[in-house]
Image (tube, helix red, strand yellow):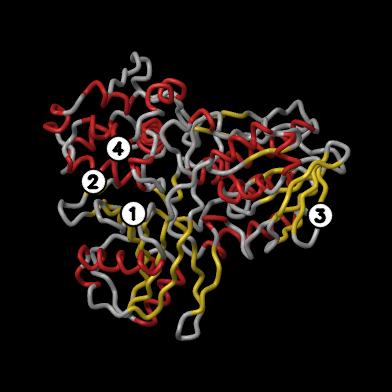
Amino acid sequence: MRSPDGQVCVPADPALPRQAPPGTEAVVVGGGIAGISAAVVLAERGVRVTLLEAAPTLGGRLGAWPHQLSDGSTQVVEHGFHAFFRHYYTWRAILRRIDPQLRFLAPAGSYPVISREWPAEDLDGLPARAPWNLITLFTRSPSLGLRDLLGSRQRLATELLAYAPGRTAAAFDHIPAAAFLQRLRLSDRAVAMLFEAFARSFFADPAALSAAELIAMFHYYFVANPQGIGFDVPITDHASAIWEPLSAHLREHGAEIVTAAPVTEIAPADGHRWSVRTAGAELRTRHLVLAVDPGALKTLIAASPGLTEQAPVLARKVAALQLAAPFAVTRLWLDRDVAPHRAAFSAVSREPTLDSVAVYSRLERPSIDWAARTGGAVVELHSYATRAPDAATATARMRAELAALWPETADAEILDVHELYAATAPAFPPGGAADRLGVTGAARGVRLAGDHVATPWLTGLMERSAATGVLAANDVLAEVGAGPEELRCGPQHGLLWRLPPYRWRP
């Protein structure tokens, strides 16, 4: 029987020493999930780690920082709501360094997909295992019934249950996810309520997402997720729950953390080392982990001609990296609560801008306390792949769309607002799989990590960031003769993966 904590995909090696040799050092560029994961493993193994982060705070797209409200109080805000799925084995293993029982996480509860046009689709409470999760979904879903299945292209639909890494990429990487969904010939309601909302949660419009990536993520999060599709959320802000404790853990293990220190250039140095330059310092290292978002990586490689000369394949692949469309996150402090029956998190289908709503005053303690004190609500609106040209426009559009979905918010007064508009997420466009970056192979002593970097087994979002960070650390440890950190993963093949691949014809 498969362990509830997944299967071992990188075993520890008790024949090798756990600790790195004295004097081993490394520089990690980037203080998000990937960089922190690499730094934690290396520092625990006795490596002298210097972590450089361009922003004033750690966390990357999971980062958090203080925001002063108009009443003079301070709330910690973030880049937006994140779901901590229970099959994020690597990321949870990192988090257990600071909270062994993960007490700061609590189940999110019901999380419906809502729409102006159709009744809500609730994905909570499905069985964890295939095919029972699928059977239950078909039985109870108002959007996907027997008539849909009988009217669909059933042979193509089986590809959702037939994931295998090489097979799926070869057959579907060149196909846009929107074309795949259209050819399934499901009802418009089923596509909108189940598949489009799912695809957009990866910061992509379905027309700009590879169908292979859609199938892979459907397998990873739903079909073969041993923990079920339920997820947890922090009960307090990310700074208090995650980044302050992880910073303390790193410093306890001798790591140096330098924030507000963007790296300006990477250059070759003597002795098979690399020169890492910031505005105010230069570090030299034999072991370098680049754990920055794809846009920052493109900028850094373009500004590093010496690295480009030594690693032309890396330079070519980085230059070809595509960023996802901008995302917009707006947190509103309202003068009244939303209706009692509203879920703490809701995905939104077929609105022009609004993709999800998180009621923070039903999720995390600081917002709950603010709402109790004022009688208001803290509501966060998300547009994952927005067409709005700026934050203010995105906020206005999302606010109007929320009022149409939740009429009780139409007349609510906005007491405070925090807006974020950025383009830092990776795109996984049709035809892009061949140029996907890997953790190693870029140049001697250089490792890459982040959610834009491929893993040898299937991962997604935060777990991909954490796994690539640990894999980068393992490569450093292997070079100096120390044993690897164990990593765990889920099932890598769908139920029907032995079927002959579907042949896509225009």
Q: Which of 34 and 420 is in front in this view?
A: 420
Q: Where's the C terminus, which quadrant? A: top left
Residue 282: mark in rendering: 3
Name the mark nearer the viewer: 3 or 2.
3
Residue 462 coordinates in the image, percent (x, y): 51, 46
Few, some or many C-alpha atoms within 10 Å of disc 4 (few <14, some 14-19, many ≥20)? Answer: many
Q: Mark 1 points at which residue?
A: 109
Left or right: residue 65 compared with residue 170: right
Q: Name the residue under label 4.
A: 178
Q: What residue type is labelled 3?
A: Glu
Q: Residue farthest to the bottom?
A: 71
Classify 10 as above or below 278: above
Tell me how far mark 2 sits from mark 1, CA to CA.
Answer: 19 Å
Name the mark nearer the viewer: 2 or 1.
2
Q: Which amino acid does label 2 sit on?
A: Met
Mark nearer the N terminus (1 vs 3): 1
Q: What residue type is labelled 4?
A: Ala
Few, some or many C-alpha atoms within 10 Å of disc 3 (few <14, some 14-19, many ≥20)? Answer: some
Name the mark nearer the viewer: 2 or 4.
4
Q: Mark 2 points at which residue?
A: 193
Mark nearer the N terminus (3 vs 2): 2
Q: Which amino acid does label 1 sit on?
A: Gly
Q: Is mark 1 on a helix, strand or loop?
A: loop
